[in-house]
Amino acid sequence: MQFDLEMDSVIKEIKKNKAKLVCIQLPDGLKPKANSIQEEIEDKTNAKVIIWAGSCFGACDVPMQLKNLKIDLLIQWGHSKFL
């Protein structure tokens, strides 16, 4: 199964926000793609990417531990479109 991760939109948002430290949060089914997502973001922006390896049960599942890491932008992917 192929997912549209909308990487062009992700790159655009990172650049718009001038984010230097970005965390990506993925559901378990997309975690195997984490390294390639990280590489693409880092190749196309000036941002450093960290991968949240913990749970991701939806948009309400924001990892509170990231507050201490001074993340500029958290990007979450899921299986349903979030408007």
Image (cartoon, rainbow, N blue to C red):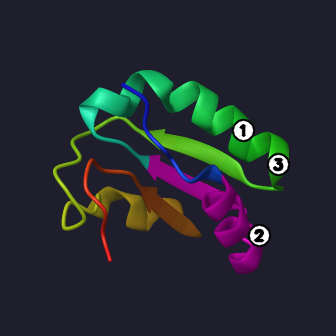
Query: Could you tell which of marks 3 and 2 lies nearer the N-terminus?
Result: 2
The disc at residue 29 is none
Please state if 30 lies on the left or on the right of 35 as rendered. left
Q: Which mark is residue 15?
A: 2
Where is mark 3, residue-wise?
44
Tell whether label 1 touches label 3 (CB within 8 Å). Answer: yes
Answer yes or no: do the residues labelled 3 and 2 have beta carbons within 8 Å?
no
Decide: is 57 above or below 31.
Answer: below
Q: What residue is shown at x 43% (from left), y 38% (from top)?
A: 3
Residue density around tag 2, few if under 14, some if 14–19, many if 20 or more, within 10 Å? some
User: Which residue is drawn at the image coordinates 20% and 57% (left, top)?
Assistant: 58
Q: At 30% from the left edge and 50% from the top edge, which residue is drawn?
A: 78
Q: Circle 1 sits in a helix, a strand or a loop, which is it?
A: helix
What amino acid is at disc 1?
Glu
Residue that badge 1 annotates: 40
Which residue is at a point 28% across and 63% down the rendered structure image? 64
Q: Earlier in the sequence, mark 2 or mark 1?
A: 2
Closer to the camera in the image, 64 or 34: 34
Considering only vertical position in the picture, is 55 above or below 69? above
Q: Position of residue 16 (x, y in %)?
A: 74, 78
Percent position of residue 49, x then y:
63, 46
